[in-house]
Image: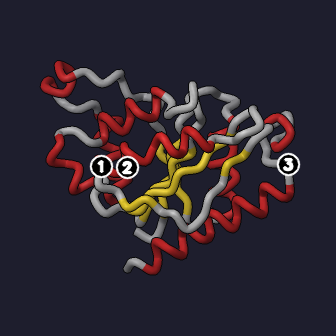
Amino acid sequence: MDHILGISGSLREASYNSALLRAAQAMFPERVKIARIDGFPLYNADVESAGFPREVEQVKQQIAAARGVVLVSPEYNNSVPGVLKNATDWLSRPSGDIRNVFEGKPVAVTGVSPGGFGTVLGQSAWLPVLRTLRARHWTGGRLMVSHARDAFDEAGNLADEEIRSRLESYVGGFIAYCDGLR
């Protein structure tokens, strides 16, 4: 429980959001772990009633064991990406599990966008979801990375030193916040 769990909201192999999450893990290798949601099926109550997918159960356990969660979320159509919303829908089922997975859990939201506004609208769109999950939304910092093509090199590594510094401050601040809740 001495770590935070990062989840990227993009399944794209060359995802800038996943690259930002990997950069955070490289900065804090002992404190940042990454969960994958690429094996989650589309939420369907018939699938739920037949039994939870193993991938969903694994991530639920990872969240429960983490001190906090960082959602690295792209912004699609000024809102949350469907793949990450689908994951939160699965992770909050059955509804009684919210208290074991999300309730009171510190959650930070950041993201990367190829456009000029970063993920400001997408991050705001997460607020009602986090409230419904009874998560503790961390407001001690904000990181929105815009112009993604300029921030990362061709290999997907974070190349912009200013953004690297902001990421280190953001993730370090979130870790310190989570540690202070002990």
The kind of secondary structure element at disc 3 is loop
Number of other residues with Cα within 10 Å of mark 1, as a class: few under 14, some 14 to 19, many 20 or more: many
In the image, taking residue 102 as reference, residue 10 lies left or right, namely: right
Alpha carbons under labels 2 and 1: distance apart: 5 Å
The kind of secondary structure element at disc 1 is loop
Alpha carbons under labels 1 and 3: distance apart: 35 Å
Tell me, for residue 130, which label it has, or none: 2
Residue 153 point in image, percent of width and height: 85, 39
List the residue tagged with mark 3: 159
- Residue drawn at x 70%, y 30% is 14
Tell me, for residue 133, which label it has, or none: 1
- Residue drawn at x 37%, y 53% is 62
Q: Are marks 1 and 3 in contact (CB under 8 Å)?
A: no
Give the total of numbered labels: 3
Q: Is residue 115 above or below residue 172?
A: above
Q: Is residue 79 above or below residue 92?
A: above
Mark closest to the chain's N terminus, 1 or 3: 1
- Residue drawn at x 33%, y 51% is 131
The kind of secondary structure element at disc 2 is helix
Foreground residue among 2 and 163:
163
In the image, taking residue 38 as reference, residue 62 lies left or right, namely: left
